[in-house]
Structure formats: structure tokens, C-alpha cells
Amino acid sequence: MSRRSRPQATPRAATHTVSWTLPALEQLAEIETFLDDDPGYAADVAAELVRAALSLNLFPGRGPVLDGEVRYLVVLDRYILRYEHDDAQVDILGVRDGRRER
């Protein structure tokens, strides 16, 4: 019986540069500070938010439109990552806990 090899996925090169605005970085730091009673968890949440943002380099249009050109991703069922993009760049505009007041 002959074995067929599985086709190998070809890694895709990043198509967009992802950058964070200053307000978004401040909001990320606020989330980490808010969760500081469990530093390991706080670091894990921050890392997952950064991973989600960086994943937009390949598929920036995947998040639903929030308003105009602004899109969003829901991360860890709770955090809302707002961003906009053009042909080469993704800008992270903000991140917040969706369960908290604005």
C-alpha cells in the first residue's frame, strides 16, 4: 500500500505592517495594570492581545466594520481591539474590556 504525503502549507509572507497608536498602547498598559493582582494572567492577556493584533498582518480585513473604516476583533471573548488598515499598514487604534463602561 502506498502512502501519500500530505500537502505542506506554504507559509505566507506578511503583507501589512502592524503598529500601535499611543492611546492603544496606554489602554493595553491599563488592562495589564487592572489585572495586576495576578501578574501571570495579566501578562498572558497582554500577550494574546498583541498576538491578535499581529495576526492582522495577513488578513487585515477580517474584522467586522465598526464605524467607517474602523474594524474590530474580539479577543479572549472580552477584549475589543479596534483598528483600521490600508493597502500596507494596520493601525491599532484602541483596546478595551468589552464588559467595562467606556
Image: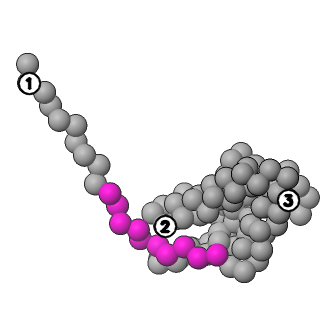
Q: Residue at x 88, y 55 (%)?
A: 100
Please give the label number shown on residue 2. 1
Amino acid type indicated by mark 2: Asn
Label 3, secondary structure: give it: helix
Tell me whether the residue at label 3 lies in contact with that at label 1, contact meaning CB atoms closer than 8 angstroms: no
CA gap between label 2 and label 3 equals 28 Å
Tell me whether the residue at label 2 lies in contact with that at label 3, contact meaning CB atoms closer than 8 angstroms: no
CA gap between label 3 and label 1 equals 57 Å
Q: Residues within 10 Å of mark 1 (few under 14, many from 20)?
A: few
For residue 24, side relative to residue 69 (left or right): right
Q: Residue at x 59, y 76 (%)?
A: 19
Disc nearer the start of the sequence (3/1):
1
Q: Quadrant of the C terminus?
A: bottom right
Label 2, secondary structure: give it: helix
Residue 35 position, x and y percent, is: 82, 55
- Residue 82 sits above or below residue 36 on the image: below
Q: Residue at x 34, y 61 (%)?
A: 12
Q: Which corner quadrant of the image does residue 4 belong to?
A: top left
Q: Closest to the observer: 96 or 31?
A: 31
For residue 73, side relative to residue 13 (left or right): right
Q: Quadrant of the N terminus?
A: top left
Please give the label number shown on residue 34. 3
Residue 69: tell me if it is visible.
no
Which residue, given by chain and number where applicable, does mark 2 sit on?
Answer: 57
Q: Which region of the structure is painted magenta?
A: 11-20
Q: Which corner quadrant of the image does residue 47 belong to?
A: bottom right
- Residue 49 sits above or below residue 18 on the image: above
Q: Residue at x 47, y 78 (%)?
A: 88
Amino acid type indicated by mark 3: Phe
Amino acid type indicated by mark 1: Ser
